[in-house]
Image (cartoon, grey):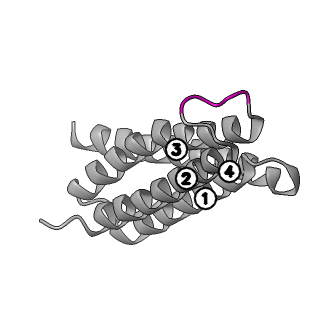
Amino acid sequence: MILAVTLTAAAAAAIVNLWLSLRVGALRRAHGISVGDGGNEALQRRMRAQLNFAENVPIVLVLIAALEIAGIGETWLAYVAGAFILGRVAHGFGMDGGKAQIGRMIGALVTLATQLFLAGVAVGAVLRVI
């Protein structure tokens, strides 16, 4: 069984994670900060964006995989996964603050809505099976 949606979402998440890591690394190099955040707010924001990504992505990928294994909604599931990844990118930019700060709110809302929606579909699937 090939889980096309899960594999695509995981690949996209890996690319976004790499992008977030590179953004942190760029600020570390620019400010000569090897360990920690050195009290640099911009670095704190980027580090937090990366950690927030790491906190939220695994549960969404597990839900996507479980639903895909259950044979539930390959087409709509791909759109949900795509929206989730775009929301995470918006959040990453938004964490820099300034004019892009709206991205933080959009990303957070998309993340919360995705988790709630996928959890609801998962519970609904179980209730139909029992």
| Residue 111 position in % (x across, y down) | 58, 46
Residue positioned 60% across, 58% down in the render: 89
> According to the image, label 1 marks what residue?
89
Q: Main secondary structure of the magenta part?
A: loop
Q: CA distance from mark 3 to mark 4?
A: 23 Å
Judged from the image, the secondary structure of the residue bearing numbered disc 2 is helix
**Callout 3 touching callout 4 (CB < 8 Å):** no
Q: Residue 97, percent across and down?
A: 81, 47
Mark 1 or mark 4: whose residue is earlier in sequence: 4
Q: CA distance from mark 2 to mark 1?
A: 9 Å
Q: Residue at x 48, y 68 (%)?
A: 79
Q: Quick one: label 3 or label 4, which is nearer the N terminus?
A: 4
Residue 37 is inside the magenta segment: yes
Q: Amino acid at mark 3?
A: Phe
Pointer 3 residue: 53
How packed mark 3 is, by other alpha carbons closer than 10 Å (few <14, some 14-19, many 20 or more), is many
Magenta stretch bounds: 35-39
Quarter occupied by residue 59: top left
Q: Relative to 127, is 120 on the left or the right? A: right
Position above or below: 83 against 45: below
Q: Nearer the viewer, residue 31 or 106?
A: 31
Q: Nearer the viewer, mark 1 or mark 4?
A: 4
If you read the primary sequence from the N terminus, does the residue marked by circle 2 or circle 4 appear first?
2
* Of marks 2 and 4, the one in the foreground: 4
Specify the label residue 30 is tagged with.
4
Q: Is residue 119 left or right of residue 32?
A: left
The type of residue carrying mark 4 is Ala
